[in-house]
Amino acid sequence: MDRREVAKLLGDFGEQARPAVPALLRASADANWDVQENASVALTRIGEPAAGELAAIICDGRDRALSERAAMALERMHPRTRSALPRLVDEFSGLPENLQILLAPVLGRSAAEHPRIIGVLGEVARSSTRLNVRLAALKALALSPVLDDDLKTLMNEGLSDPMLEVRFHSAAGLWRTMGDHAAALPAIASGLTNGALRIEAVTLLGEMGEAAGPAVPELVRVLADERVYRPLRTPPSAGIALSRIGDRALEFVAPLLQSTNAQTRLNAVITIGLFGPRGGAQGRDLLPLLSDPEREVRFSAALSLSSVGLHVSNAVPVLFEILDEDDPFLVTWAGDALAKIDSKLAPGNTAR
């Protein structure tokens, strides 16, 4: 029996395999991927008893690498981590920075299981001298299923912090835990100006929907510069957010169709298509782009016209051009668009 089979067998023993937790933890870093995977799965299957053993290894701290692997294992084991919480809560503030960052999400998700978790994470979020630790604690608090006045106070305090990252994650926490979009919106919108925060800011604004309306002009500026690989398959994230915020955004997107930058035009065309039938009013603005010198812009214009419900014959030559592509997704989309213009134009009904 080789190591892969041993690791799997220990998982089959479940709670009875508790004494093997240290060995399984070491095996979770084995050079053989199958051994790693089977050992990680075995730790999860042992469950609560393994969580307690992992907490002991973390807090012992004699083997830094082993402690880090134990923290990562606990992250994967949620929610079967209750037996680890008492010791982690007691010692969290004194753990090394890397372990605090790894364990903060474990505590945040488990806040309902232990009365001191919110207080411990809150104290670290307020007083740690390490920005990465403060941010990890704030992000963890945003995962908490517990809603209380202390948590709201902490998040509101963070909105006036001199660090943009702290203001941003405090606002994200207010939105995700309290649904307080009015207080959170300015700080979240400010994240659009920071490369490290931009994607999360766009996602949060999209989640807010109509409440994020004041941030539309800033989001459109992000849309103009966004670069996406295979955008017809993976639309620009700012475009997705704008389509969720509401129809008001369309009037801000439409001017980008006139941009001299092909990527900006492409992003605008795709974004209008994301609105579906709600984008019909701007659909006519897409017609000139059927003759755009850039192939992807032409393609997106033809497909977006169909998406907004404008099934016009002007798009037929470009849709037939798409049918010659190797991408089955685009070919199917173009075929559907042709069928909506005229059922006789569907690929199965016409010879070319």
Image (cartoon, helix red, strand yellow):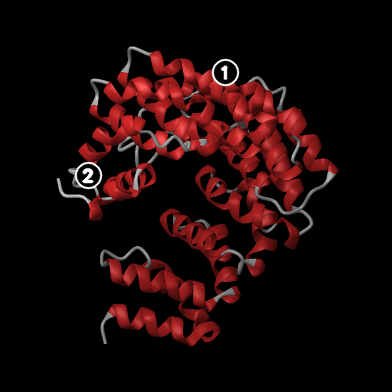
In the image, what residue occupies the spot 52% across and 78% down? 46
Residue 234 appears anywhere in the view: yes
Image x and y of residue 344, in percent: 29, 49
Instruction: Please state if 101 lies on the left or on the right of 307 as rendered.
Output: right
Q: Which mark is residue 251?
A: none
Depth check: give the residue in front, 348 or 259.
348
- Secondary structure found at label 1: helix
Instruction: Please state if 85 lies on the left or on the right of 349 as rendered.
Output: right
Depth check: give the residue in front, 215 or 12.
215
The amino acid sitting under disc 1 is: Pro
Q: Mark 1: few, some, or many residues within 10 Å (few <14, many ≥20)?
A: some
Q: Which mark is residue 217?
A: 1
Image x and y of residue 174, in percent: 72, 37
Is residue 138 positioned above or below 78 on the image? above
Residue 197 appears anywhere in the view: no
Instruction: Please state if 245 lies on the left or on the right of 337 as rendered.
Output: right
In the image, what residue occupies the spot 45% across and 85% down? 12
Is residue 90 positioned above or below 175 on the image? below
Which residue does the numbered mark 2 point to in the structure image?
323
Q: Nearer the viewer, mark 1 or mark 2?
A: 2
Image x and y of residue 255, in percent: 47, 15
